[in-house]
Amino acid sequence: MRMGVSGISALAIAALLALPAAGCAQEEAGSPSESNAARTLTGSITDVAGIEVGHHTLTERPTGCTVILARGGAVGGVDVRGGAPGTREVALLDPVNSVQEVNAVFLAGGSAFGLDVGTGVMRWLEERGVGFEAWGGNVVPIVAGAILFDLQLGDPSIRPGSDCGYAAAEAATAGPVKEGSVGAGAGATIGNLAGLGRAMMGGTGTASVTLPDGVVVGAIVAINAVGDVIDPATGEIIAGVRSENGTGFADARTLIRSRTGLIGGAGANTTIGVVATNATLTKAQATKVAQMAQDGLARTLYPAHTPWDGDTVFSLATGELEGEADVLVLGAVAADVVAEAILRAVRSATGTEGIPSVSDLAGSR
């Protein structure tokens, strides 16, 4: 039975600051058909009933993909803010276009080569009869996605493809989601303004908020930013462009304003993510939630939405809760969980190939 969402704005205010602590519960979440009351909440996007997540991380070099499944279908939206995006099926998500639901969204490394991940996800869904009902009982799975640039680490000929997408879909569950140097964020880096030699490792992170009336909003993000990650609660730089001696931060704000030592590179960055809710939304409303969720990037990344990246956020609404949703509240909370997911991503990352993580840098001080 579906629950109503009337009165969401009156109930939501106290929950906006109630973001879960980093880390996930050890118990597995329930199946997508279970009510929120019966499910074990994990602080992950999978707290949204009907959403499953799977990673596939390549062993040959740091790269991979992350698949977010909505087997029962979800109304989708998208907002592309970066100047160098790599995406699949974003036009389909335009509210003026006909198809109303998507079955999956993928996030992948490998630059534009990583768009092949979507083919594997489609194959996995088709084998299970999931997709847009076409002719003679056939289905066409609706799969959107976006990529980030991680070809600078190791052999660039090694990148996620369709088999990687299939494996990630096969691995997807409604349980806790692994964070850090996994999936789409496995080869992600931060702080490339002054070149890779002064960068740090990015990663994949997730977070969720459950409002008092049962509305759930979750996010998953793969962060590969050109500049710094800043904790919006304290203004402190968490990760980013390192100082010349490698033990501290140069501060991307200072570098940009002084135009000192900027190297960077067009398309060589990009933060991509998905927000999801169990509320019922139209495509136009889902698009607005995606737009507002981008504020989470702006709060935590400096700079964000640059000509050198392809910052993209998708939104999914599973419609478990019937009734009119408050888009203002959903969008505001979506920005909160995106910001939290970014912080969790970098704090969970593992250093590689001379590029330190947050924990590595803290240990060297």
Image: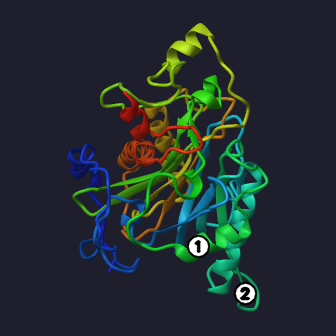
- Dot 1 crowding, Cα within 10 Å, few <14, some 14–19, many 20+: many
Sequence-wise, the earlier of marks 2 and 1 is: 2
Q: Is residue 138 left or right of residue 288?
A: right
Q: Which residue is mark 2?
A: 138
Q: Which mark is residue 46?
A: none
Q: Position of residue 70 (x, y in %)?
A: 52, 71
Q: Amino acid at mark 1?
A: Ala
Q: Position of residue 171 (x, y in %)?
A: 53, 74
Closer to the camera in the image, 117 or 93:
117
- Secondary structure at numbered mark 2: loop
Answer with the quarter of the image where residue 100 lies. bottom right
Which residue is found at the position 73% from the left and 68% from the top? 162
- Dot 2 crowding, Cα within 10 Å, few <14, some 14–19, many 20+: few
Which residue is found at the position 50% from the left and 38% from the top? 356
Q: Position of residue 285 (x, y in %)?
A: 50, 52
Q: Is residue 62 left or right of residue 201?
A: right
Q: Quadrant of the N terminus?
A: bottom left
Which residue is found at the position 61% from the left and 41% from the top? 311
Q: Which residue is mark 1?
A: 169
| Residue 163 seen from this side | yes
How many discs mark residues in the rendered view? 2
| Residue 73 seen from this side | no
Q: Amino acid at mark 2?
A: Asn
